Amino acid sequence: MARVTRSLATAFVIGLTLTGCGSATPSPTGSAAALGGDITVYAAASLQGTFTELAASFEAANPGTTVVLNFAGSSALVTQIIEGAPADVFASADTDNMARLTDAALGDGEPVDFATNVLTIAVPPGNPAGITDLTDLTRPDVRLVACAPEVPCGAAAETVAASAGVTLSPVSEESSVTDVLGKVTSGEADAGLVYVTDVAAAGAAVEGIEFAEAASAVNTYPIVPVTGSASADVARAFVDYVTGSGGAAVLRAAGFGAA
Amino acid sequence: MTFSLDLHVADRDVSLHLDVAAGETVAILGPNGAGKSTLLGTIAGLVTPDSGRCELNGTVLFDLPGAGRGPRTWRAPHQRGVSLLAQEALLFPHLSVLDNVAFGPRSAGAPSGRARQIATHWLREVDAEQLAARRPAELSGGQAQRIAVARALASDPGLLLLDEPLAALDISVAPTVRRMLRRVLAGRSALIVTHDVLDAYTLADRVVIVEGGRIVDQGTPAEVFDRPRSAFAAGLAGLNLLTGVRRGTTLITADAAAPVANIPEPGVADGAPLSLAVRPGAVSVSIDPPADSQLSSVRAELIDLEPRGDFVRARSAVLAADVSPKEAAQLDAAVGSPVWFSFAAAAATLYPTVPSDRTTSS
Amino acid sequence: MTVPRWVFAVAGLGAVFVLLPLVAMALRVNWTEFVPLISSESSVAALLLSLRTSLAATALCVVFGVPMALVLARTDFWGQKVLRSLVLLPLVLPPVVGGIALLYTFGRRGLLGQTFGLLGIEIAFSTTAVVIAQTFVALPFLVLSLEGALRTVGSRYEAVGATLGASPTTVLRRITLPLVLPAVLSGAVLSFARALGEFGATLTFAGSLQGTTRTLPLEIYLQRETDPDTAVALSLVLVVVAVVIVSLAHRTGEPSRRRARALS
C-alpha cells in the first residue's frame, strides 16, 4: 500500500488548521470549499504510475484530503473489497472485475470508463529475434511468454490471436504482466504480450512493437466510488478528477487510450 | 621382531621407542595423560604424529621423517592389519552379532559364506556362539566385549591393540573376560593399555611403563612390579619405593634429612645409586626408636592417618605404613611430629637403580 | 521436569495460531464440487507435475546432499564454516531471490546457460528448470538433518571399521550410511515437502505452463485470479499431502533419535 502525501500538502494542511481558515476533518455541511478527509483508492496494478501522480495532484488541489493508494491485480482487489476491505474508490483494469463489484452492490453509482489499454509486443532491447508483427510470434525459434488465459491480459492475447488467425504457443503462461515483462527484460524470452502502458512504464528495459490486431482486444478501465465510504464526497471528487481533463492528460501521457 | 615403533610428538614432549616380538603381548602402563591411547591411535592410523616410524612384519605403517626431511609414508588404517579394541565394545548396532564378527573377513574380500564360517569360529573361541543371531542392543556389557574381541581377532590382525578392554566392565564380569583374553592372546602379538596390575600380570609377557612421554621402565611383570623403577609402577604394585645412594649400611635418600638406617646387604658398591621397595603392610610405626636393632628404620614426620577399610595408612614423605586401627589410635597424637618407620630386612627388596639385568629395550 | 501451567496456555495459543488458518481454509472449500474441482485437467496436470518434479528433486538432493553432509560433518578444512553457511543459504533466502540467482546461472544469458545454449540445452521454461529450482531450495534440508545425524553418531564406529580392514568406501556403505539411514530418509522426506511447496523460485526461473512448469502451487496462484473455489480445493490437497509427509518424516526420524540415545 502506497501512502502518497506530499510534504508540501501536509504543511499546507497544518498551516490552514493553525490559522483556523480550514479543517482537516470533513465539514458537516459538505460544501465544496471545505472538502476534506482520507480516502483509500484500490487501483489495478497497471495504474500505479498514473494514479500515484494523480493522487498527489488531487491532494495539492484539495487541501485537507489524503489519498491512500493500494495497487494489486483487479481480481485480488475486488475479492478484498467484497471481503470487507476499507476501499473508497475502485479502479479496475477490466469491466469483468468491475461487474463483480457492482453485482455485489458495492458500487456507488454507475462505473465510469476512464481509459483504455491495448496489447503490444514487448521485446528485449535491440529485438534479437527480429520480431516485426504478431505472426512472427508463431515462429518455432521465438520464445513467447504471455499471460495465462485465466487473467485479463491472457484473455486479450487469445482474442488478438484469434482475430489475426494465428495460434500462439507460449513457453510460459504467467499470472501477471509483471512476470511476463520480467521474462522479457531478463532475456529469457524473445517476446512477450503485454499492454502498451507496461512497455511505456518499463522504459529502456524493453522495446514495444505495435501490431494492427491489438485493436480487436481493447481493455477498458472503469472507476467507481465504493458504497459506505466515510468520505463519500472526497471519493466522488477523486473519481471526477480522474475522469476529467486533468486525469486524461496524465493517462494519455502514460500510453492509455481515451475511453 | 615383528613390530617396531619410534614416535615423536614435539609439542607434547613424547619420544619413545617400542618393539613387540612375534607372539608377544606387551602391557603399557602409565599415569593419565601419558599419551597411552594416543600411542595406540597412532599405531592404528587414527592419529598422525609429528614424526616417527612404524613397521609391522616388514611393512612400513608410517614413516614420517619430520617436516622437510625426506618423503613421508602414511598407510591408511584399513591397510595396516592392526585391530583396535577399545574400552567400549562399539559393536555396529545395525548388524547382528555374527555379521559384526564377519565384518573384518568380508572387508578383506571373503565371500559371505566363508566370512560367516570364520565369524562362527571366533564366536566359539570367545564362548559366544549362542549369541550369533542377537543384535548388539540385546547384549550385556561383558557379552558385547567378548563379541568385540572375536570381531577384532576375526580380521586376523598382525598386531592387536587393546585400549583398557576391561575398564568399562562390571567387576563381576571382568574376571571371565580376562581369562578369555588370556586364552586368545596366547601366542599373539598384542599391545594392551591398562591401569590394572592384574591385567599386566595375567595377560602380558612384558610390561612397559610410560611416564612424561618416555619409557621409564620395562621388563617382565615380576621384574617391573617387584623392583619398580618409577613411583608410578611402585604405586601400582602397592609398594613403597625409596631411591638414593648407599653410604655403608645407610640409604641416603633425596630427602637427606631422612636417611634409612641399617639397610640389609645391598650388593652394590658404596656410593652407588640404590632402590629399596617395601610393602606398607610390612612397615611398623613407633613413637620411640625400634627396640630391635636388626630392623631397618627411618625417622620422618607423620603426615596423616588415613582409614582404608580394616587398616589405617600412616603416611610420611618417605614411607607409608599400614597399621591396625588400635595402633593408629595410639599414633593419633603424633600426627605432625617425627616418628620411626621400621621394617624387617627380609620384607624389603634392594636393587641397583640402574640395573644390569634390565635395559630400555628388549 | 514439570511444565508450568502458563506454558500450556501459551503453547495452546501457538497451536491455535497455526491450526486456525487451516480450519478457516477447510471451511471455505466447496465440498459438493470438491472432486470435480481437483480432478479437472489442469489440476491433475499440476498435481502430477508437482509429484514428478519433487521426486526428481528429492533424488538429486540425496545424490548431492549425502556427500555434502559427509564432507561438512567428517572433514575439517579452512573456510568450512563459511561454506556451510553458504550451502544453507537457500533456507533463509526468499525463494524469489533464489529464482533470480538461478536465472543468472542457468538462464539463457546466465553464467552456465550460455554454455548450455551452445550445447543445445535450453533449461529455462522446461521441466528441468522446475527440478533445478526445487533442488536448490530443498537441498539444505537434507544436508542439515544429515549433518546433524552424522555428528550425533560420531566417527567411532567408522574408526573401528577401518581398523578391521574396511576401505573408506566399505565403511561408508556398510557402517556410516546404515547408521544414519533414518536421517537420510527423514531428510529426503523434508526435501520432498519443500520441493512440493516451492513457488517463488519456480515462478521466477521456470515460468508457468500447464504440464511443463506449472506445478501445484503455481496452479493455485493462477486459479486464485478467476476461480477461488479451485484454488481453495487445491490448497487443501497440498495441505493434506504436506501433513502426510510431515508425519512420515517424524516416524522415520524417530529410530535415529533412539539410536542416538543408545549411543550417548
Image (cartoon, rainbow, N blue to C red):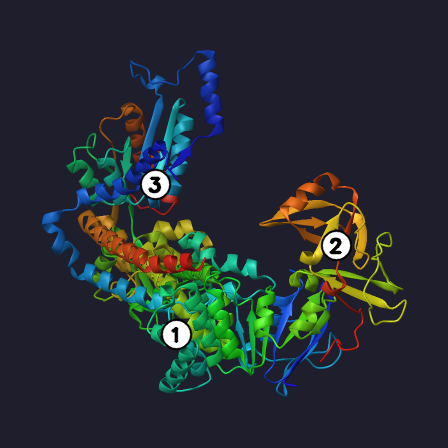
Name, please, the residue furthest toward the front.
B292
| Residue C210, quarter of the rendered image | bottom left
x and y, in percent, of residue C150 in the image: 46, 63
Q: Circle 3 sits in a helix, a strand or a loop, which is it?
A: strand
Q: Residue at x 58, y 67 (%)?
A: B198
Image disc number at residue B128: 1
Residue A101 image point, x, y percent? 20, 37
Give the numbered dot on residue B319.
2
Asked if badges 2 and 3 are on one and the same chain, I answer no
Q: CA distance from mark 2 to mark 1?
A: 47 Å
Quadrant where the N terminus of chain B lies?
A: bottom right
Q: Position of residue C145 (x, y in %)?
A: 42, 59
Question: Is B273 placed left or right of A59 in the picture?
Answer: right
Mark whose residue sits in front, 2 or 3: 2
Q: Quadrant of residue A246?
A: top left
Indicate the chain on which mark 2 is placed. Answer: B
For marks 2 and 1, give the one nearer the viewer. 2
Report how far apart the C-alphas of labels 3 and 1 lie in the structure.
Answer: 78 Å
Determine which residue is flagged by label 3: A71
- Asked if disc 3 and disc 1 are in contact, CB closer than 8 Å, the reply is no
| Discs 2, 3 touching: Cβ within 8 Å | no
Which residue sits furthest left? C32
Q: What's the amino acid at mark 3?
A: Phe
Q: Nearer the viewer, residue B231 or A254?
A: B231
User: Mark 2: which secondary structure?
Assistant: loop
